[in-house]
Image (cartoon, grey):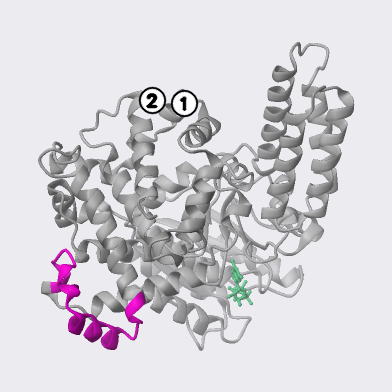
C-alpha cells in the first residue's frame, strides 16, 4: 500500500470513529484493527505495529473518559502521537553549520540511490547559501564517478574523483583535503555499495570513516525494500556510526513503511526522503509534519521553508510594483520561475493544510512543470517592453501570433496565461495602490515579510492556534474542504466557469498565494490569530482569484 493510501485509510478509520454514536472498547478495537492492518500492508515492521496497538490501548482508559467527544479526541491524539513515534527516534537530527567545515559520508547498498541523493543534498545546502563539494569514493562500480560528475556538473557543484586511483580511502582523503583547503562549508563523500551486505563493503566503509572522520554518516535506504529494511539497517548500524537516514524512491508505488520503520532499528532520524529521480526531488523529513501530511493535514513548516527558499525578498522590483498596485508580465514570469525552481507543484500543494491525498490526485508533477516551462518559452518570446507592460499590448493579434510562433505554444494557451495575469493584476491593484492594504505598507516591511514568512507562521503562533489541526479548522471555516475542492476542480479546468483552466490556473494560484504570503505580514505586526487569519484569508483569497 503506498503512503497516500495508507494515510487515507488511517484517516478514514479516524473519521469513522467520529461518526460512532457510542465509543466503547469495541469501537477502539475496530479502529486499531483497521489502522494496524493498513500499517502492516505498508510493510511497517510487525513488532512496531504491535507496539503501537499496545501503547494506544495503554494510554486510553475508557472508564476515565467521561464524555464521548472527550474520548474521541483522546483516542485520535493518541493514535497521531503513536504514528509520529513510529518515525521519530527522539534524536535531534544533525545539520551542517555554516562557517564550520562539515563532512558527510554516504553509505548504503548498491542501487539504493546514494549517488543521486548526494547531489540532491548538495543542491539543497547550496540553495541555503553553503559552499558545497562532492567527492566520489566509489571505485567499485565502473561509471560511478561519471555519474557523480554528470549530476554535479548539472547542478554546478564542484566535485572530486579519479578514473585511475583504485583506493577509495585515498580518493576520499584527497578530495576532503582539497575542499577543506578551499574553505568549503560542506563536503559530501559518496562511497561504494554492494549487492548485499558483504564484509568488504563494511570494511571499506570503516576505513573511509576512519580516514575522513565524518561529522555525520548518512545511511541511504531504498524505500521499496519492505520488511527486509529492519535487518539491513541493523547490519549497517553495527558497522558504522549511522547519524541520519535518507529514504529514497518514496515516489510512485513505494510502500515505504519498511524503510520508515527502520528508524527504530538504528535509533537515527530520517532527515530527507527522495521522491523522484530529479535533483529537486528531495523532501526534508520531520516526524510530525510527515504524519500530518500523510493524513492530509498539510505541512506548514515545509511550506514556509519553501517560500523562504524562493527568496522573494531579492525581487525588489516586484515588491515595489506590488505595493504600487502594479503587476507586470515580467513580475509574473519571475514568480513562475521561482516556483519552477522549487520543483514539482504537487509537492508544494501537498504541504497545504486541507489537501487530502485524494485531492492531490491528478496533480501530475511532470505535467505541471512542463506547462510552466512552456509559459517560460512564452515569456522568452516577448520583448522587454512587452514584459514590462500590463499585457494589454497583446490585444494586437499580430503580436500574439508572433509570440505563439516564437514559443511554439498555442494562441489559446497564451490567451489563458494572459487572462490569469490580468486576474492577478486586478487583485494586486486592489491590494496595492494608495488605498489598498499593501499600498499602505512600506516596501522594506514587505521585503522583510517575504524574507521571513515564518515570522507569521512561527511555532508559537501555530501553538496559539491549536497547532496544525487548529489551522486546518480555520481553513475549513474559511470555505471548508468542499469549497476548496470545488475551487481546485475549477482551476484544474473541470468546473464550470474555469477561466483559463487547466494547470495554468494552478500556477497562477501559486503565484497569487506566494504574493499573498509575501505581503501578508507586512509591517511585521501581524498580531496573533487575527493577523494569521488575515494572511491565510489573503492566501485563500488569492487562490480564489484563479477562478
Ligand atoms: N524514482 C526514484 N528513483 C530514484 C530515487 N533516488 C535514486 N533513484 C534512482 O535509483 C537508481 C540508483 O540510484 P544511484 O544513485 O545510482 O544509486 P547508488 O546507491 O549510488 O548505487 P551504487 O553507486 O551502485 O552504489 C537510479 O536510476 C536513480 O535515478 C528516488 O528518490 N526516486
Residue labelled with disc 1: 465
Residue 294: image tag: none
Return the x and y of residue 454 as percentages of the image width and height: 36, 39
At x 26% / y 87%, what residue is drawn?
406
Q: In this rendering, would 300 be left or right of 217?
A: left
Mark 2 and mark 1 in contact (Cβ < 8 Å)?
yes
Provide the residue span drawn in magenta.
386-412
Return the x and y of residue 194 as percentages of the image width and height: 70, 74
Does the magenta segment cover residue 221? no
Return the x and y of residue 157 as percentages of the image width and height: 37, 71
Mark closer to the chain start, 1 or 2: 1
Q: Where is residue 527, by image quadrant?
A: top left
User: Alpha-carbon distance for marks 1 and 2?
Assistant: 7 Å
Q: In this rendering, would 431 be left or right of 136?
A: left
At x 74% / y 26%, what residue is drawn?
75
The rendered magenta stretch, by its main secondary structure, is classed as helix
At x 41% / y 28%, what residue is drawn?
461
Label 1 crowding class (10 Å Cα cut-off): few <14, some 14-19, many 20+?
some
Name above or below for residue 268 compared with residue 82. Answer: below
Residue labelled with disc 2: 529
Q: In this rendering, would 27 be left or right of 1?
A: right
At x 14% / y 41%, what residue is drawn?
439
Amino acid at each position: 500500500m503506498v503512503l497516500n493510501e495508507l494515510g487515507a485509510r488511517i484517516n478514514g478509520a479516524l473519521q469513522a470513529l467520529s461518526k460512532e454514536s457510542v465509543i466503547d472498547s469495541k469501537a477502539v478495537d475496530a479502529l486499531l484493527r483497521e489502522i494496524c492492518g493498513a500499517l502492516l500492508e505498508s510493510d511497517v515492521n510487525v513488532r512496531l505495529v504491535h507496539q503501537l496497538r499496545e501503547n494506544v490501548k495503554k494510554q486510553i482508559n475508557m472508564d476515565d473518559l467521561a464524555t464521548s467527544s472527550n474520548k474521541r479526541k483522546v483516542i485520535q491524539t493518541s493514535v497521531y502521537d503513536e504514528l509520529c513515534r513510529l518515525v521519530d527516534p527522539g534524536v535531534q537530527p544533525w545539520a551542517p553549520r555554516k562557517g564550520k567545515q562539515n563532512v558527510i559520508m554516504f553509505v548504503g547498498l548498491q542501487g539504493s540511490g546514494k549517488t543521486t541523493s548526494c547531489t540532491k543534498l548538495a543542491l539543497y545546502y547550496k540553495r541555503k547559501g553553503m559552499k558545497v563539494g562532492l567527492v566520489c569514493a566509489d571505485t567499485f562500480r565502473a561509471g560511478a564517478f561519471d555519474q557523480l560528475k554528470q549530476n554535479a556538473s548539472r547542478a554546478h557543484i564542484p566535485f572530486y574523483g579519479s578514473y585511475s586511483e583504485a583506493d577509495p580511502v585515498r580518493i576520499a582523503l584527497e578530495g576532503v583535503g582539497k575542499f577543506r583547503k578551499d574553505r568549503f562549508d560542506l563536503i559530501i563523500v559518496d562511497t561504494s555499495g554492494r549487492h548485499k551486505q558483504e564484509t568488504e563493503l563494511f570494511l571499506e566503509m570503516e576505513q573511509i570513516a576512519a580516514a575522513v572522520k565524518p561529522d555525520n554518516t548518512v545511511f541511504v535506504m531504498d524505500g521499496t525494500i519492505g520488511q527486509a529494511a529492519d535487518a539491513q539497517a541493523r547490519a549497517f548500524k553495527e558497522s558504522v556510526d549511522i547519524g541520519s537516514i535518507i529514504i529514497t524512491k518514496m515516489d510512485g508505488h513505494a510502500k515505504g513503511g519498511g524503510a520508515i520503520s527502520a528508524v527504530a532499528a538504528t535509533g537515527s532520524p530520517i532527515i530527507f526522503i527522495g521522491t523522484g529521480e530529479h535533483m529537486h526531488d528531495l523532501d526534508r523529513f520531520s516526524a510530525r509534519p510527515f504524519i500530518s501530511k500523510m493524513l492530509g493535514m498539510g505541512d506548514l513548516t515545509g511550506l514556509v521553508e519553501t517560500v523562504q527558499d524562493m527568496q522573494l525578498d531579492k525581487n525588489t522590483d516586484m515588491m515595489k510594483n506590488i505595493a504600487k498596485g502594479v503587476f507586470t508580465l515580467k513580475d509574473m514570469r519571475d514568480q513562475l520561475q521561482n516556483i519552477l525552481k522549487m520543483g514539482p507543484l504537487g509537492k508544494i500543494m501537498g504541504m497545504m493544510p486541507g489537501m487530502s491525498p485524494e485531492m492531490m490526485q491528478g496533480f501530475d508533477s511532470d505535467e505541471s512543470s512542463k506547462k510552466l516551462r512552456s509559459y517560460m518559452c512564452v515569456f522568452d518570446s516577448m520583448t522587454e517592453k512587452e514584459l514590462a507592460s500590463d499585457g494589454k499590448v497583446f490585444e494586437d493579434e499580430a503580436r500574439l501570433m508572433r509570440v505563439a510562433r516564437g514559443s511554439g505554444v498555442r494562441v489559446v494557451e497564451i490567451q489563458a496565461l494572459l487572462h490569469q495575469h490580468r486576474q492577478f493584476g486586478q487583485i494586486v491593484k486592489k491590494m496595492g495602490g494608495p488605498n489598498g492594504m499593501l499600498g499602505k505598507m512600506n516596501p522594506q516591511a514587505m521585503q522583510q515579510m517575504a524574507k521571513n514568512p515564518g515570522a507569521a507562521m512561527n511555532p508559537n503562533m501555530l501553538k496559539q492556534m491549536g497547532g496544525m489541526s487548529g489551522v486546518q479548522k480555520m481553513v475549513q471555516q474559511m470555505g471548508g474542504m468542499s469549497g476548496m475542492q470545488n475551487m481546485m476542480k475549477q482551476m484544474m479546468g473541470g468546473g464550470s466557469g474555469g477561466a483559463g483552466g487547466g494547470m495554468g490556473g494552478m500556477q497562477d494560484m501559486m503565484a497569487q498565494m506566494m504574493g499573498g504570503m509575501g505581503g501578508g505580514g507586512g509591517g511585521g505586526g501581524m498580531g496573533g490569530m487575527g493577523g494569521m487569519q488575515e494572511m491565510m484569508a489573503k492566501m485563500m483569497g488569492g487562490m480564489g482569484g484563479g477562478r
